[in-house]
Amino acid sequence: MVNWLIRLIRKIKNRKGEYEEMAQDTNISTIKGVYVNREISWLKFNERVLEEAQNENSPLCEKLSFLAIYQSNLDEFFMVRVAGVKSQIASNYTKPDDSGMTPKELLSALDKKTHAFMEKQYSCLYRSILPVLKKQAEIEFRTPEKLTHEQRAFTDEYFHRVLFPVLTPLAVDSSRPFPMLANKSLNLAVRLSSKENKGEKCFAVVQVPSILPRFTELPADGDTRCFILLEDIITDYLEELFELHEIKAVCPFRITRNSDLTIDEEADDFMYEIEKSIKRRKRGRPVRLELLQHTDEDTRKFLIKALNINENSIYEVQGPIDLTFFSKFANIPGCEKLCFAPIRPTTPPGDFFGYTDIFRAIREGDRLVHHPYETFDCVVQFIAQAAEDENVLAIKQTLYRVSGNSPIIASLIKAAENGKQVTVLVELKARFDEENNINWAKKLEKAGCHVIYGLTGLKTHCKIALVVRREEDGIRRYLHLGTGNYNDSTAKIYTDLGLFTCNEQFGADASSLFNVITGYSRPPEYKHFIVAPHGMRSFFEYMIRQETENAKKGLPSGITVKVNSLVDPKIIELLYEASKAGVRVQLIVRGICCLIPGIEGVSENITVMSIVGQLLEHSRIFRFENAGNPRIYMGSADWMPRNLDRRVELVFPIEDETQKARAFGILDTMLSDTTNARFMQSDTSYEHVDLRGKKKISSQLTFYHEAQARLKELQSIEKDSVLIPIHSAEE
């Protein structure tokens, strides 16, 4: 099977289909100054996240949360992207990328920018957040020397009762080598001097326990709520861990390891190979060492030698090290007024109002749900009802990322126990979710589900659930097609769209797709679905070229696209050609954008907008004017080479006229955003919308208020009219 799949993938990549007839070779690197390096563009995105921490309109605790998000994003960037660049240099790879930068040039630029951004991060914390937090909210972080007598008694009791039994001091000497420290763990390097052998220098490491909260609330000091960091308590009592030595210096530090997995996809036991790779990740080479400013020089040299790390990989910060803990601090009880007003999903979604039988609702028409403004529970209930419905014969679903306590997986297990045919593709290669997915895969298999681990050479990233149901008029297929993961946790903070349909041709395409994923079926010519890797690139290239040709003929033309990332050089080149032909191109790109708008003679007709706000923009939407008959699509794919060429992705059309109009409206609302939107300039910087003469509009709040208003209107109609049917499963 493995060899067959490899041959299939190669064949797919070489296929010439309907959409490839107009294909032309492009080489964007021949045009200087029109392509932004991917890593540099990502740093610009993370800078926009940091700007939200500085935004005067962001509530105080939300500013802390944005700092935490910035830190978490940067950690992953080092673990994967920076690690990748360093690996290229180590292997003597010197070829410039499409922006013209060699790996060495890129690493130098990344070092410079990340150092500058981290300085900006801590400047924001100490100048813009903590003083205001103390003054306005009477909340303060304290160090041991500033504790009151009562607070000192509290930390003494906390250390001896909670901390001391957990701590393990690790001496480093000729018989005890430097310990293998966990990736991203916070540690204390301790320089000691023996009390018995005066002048003898030695070192030890104490890991700050990640199992305990990073911060602890102290007894209040008057009206001031006080907190202390875990590492500060440990430092204050270190002498009790090293009674035979004198403590000369204590230096907090944190290492970030290369965490990109190298997987042998042809291994006989793929799950075992993934598990081995996860273990190797924990021992990955350090790519970053974070230290406090003014770290003891002897200890600094000790860490550099022990970790075999160079000076360029050292990041000295004001402290505290690792600000991700602020994500939890931002949610402490009593600080609700310092946070954004919560976005509470409307229940039920407007399209499902009046129905208890989800299948009946879908039979009566396509349903479009916009998360998190409308509840994700309808997706959960779709699978839950299918699991219990005696007429359901089979459930097929792809899973990329799920929550730690997934109700969807619980329903799939229940369905198998109820005798349904359940097939689940669990993508084991989903980065940093590998362990979670392995655990779920084992539980699903144990329950009797047919579990597929993914395809050789490809990640399966499409979001699709298929329910096969026996009905009076025959077999009917019900579908959920989405832009986001089947994750009930992230669905509360990620913006995504989901389409429910029982369109027969969509159902036929879905069955064909699952047959390709699970068996030996040849990839078909789908009637409606656009599927990577064998047809999506050629489809999008064709659609862009078609808009270009329409503009040249004087026909209505235009391209409006919302994606998370735009990287693909060929797609970018075609968008430039469209712009030169007069096509208006409106791009909403949350993160990485390698295209540059506003270049004279190249991209004058292109705008690039990035929306960064309370929620994480995650949906993908594609609109083409199509000579006056607009077509709109949604799906899982960004415009990146990996999505178009190395993943199983799904993009689907919105064909129901009501839902099509709604989808158009969603794009229009996003384009009208003047609050969270920034526009990319021709120098690649991003600027907020000039509000002079304009109304302040937040697209995210607009969607939320529209969802609430729609539900209230439906409730009012139901209350005033006895003619509104309430459908139930019993009918």
Image: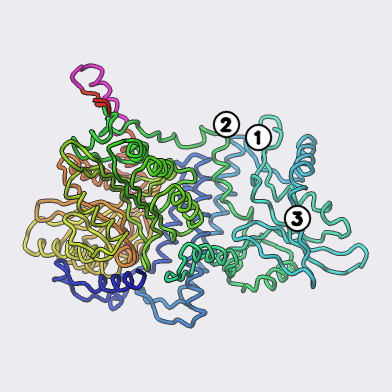
Q: What residue lies at 79% left-to-right and 71% top-to-bottom?
A: 175
Identified by mark 2, the residue type is Gly
Magenta span contains residue 718: yes
- Towards the viewer: 718 or 2: 2
Report the residue marked by disc 1: 225
Q: Is residue 24 visible?
A: yes
Identified by mark 3, the residue type is Thr
Q: Which region is colored magenta?
A: 706-724
Which label sits on residue 334? 2
Q: What residue lies at 21% left-to-right and 54% top-to-bottom?
A: 509
Earlier in the chain: of badge 3 and badge 1, it is 3
Give the x, y percent position of residue 72: 52, 54
- Towards the viewer: 220 or 197: 197
Give the residue at the far front of this rendering.
419
The reply, left or right, for residue 689 in relation to residue 530 is right
Disc 2, disc 1: CB below 8 Å? yes
The reply, left or right, for residue 563 in relation to residue 85 is left
Report the residue marked by disc 3: 168
Identified by mark 1, the residue type is Arg
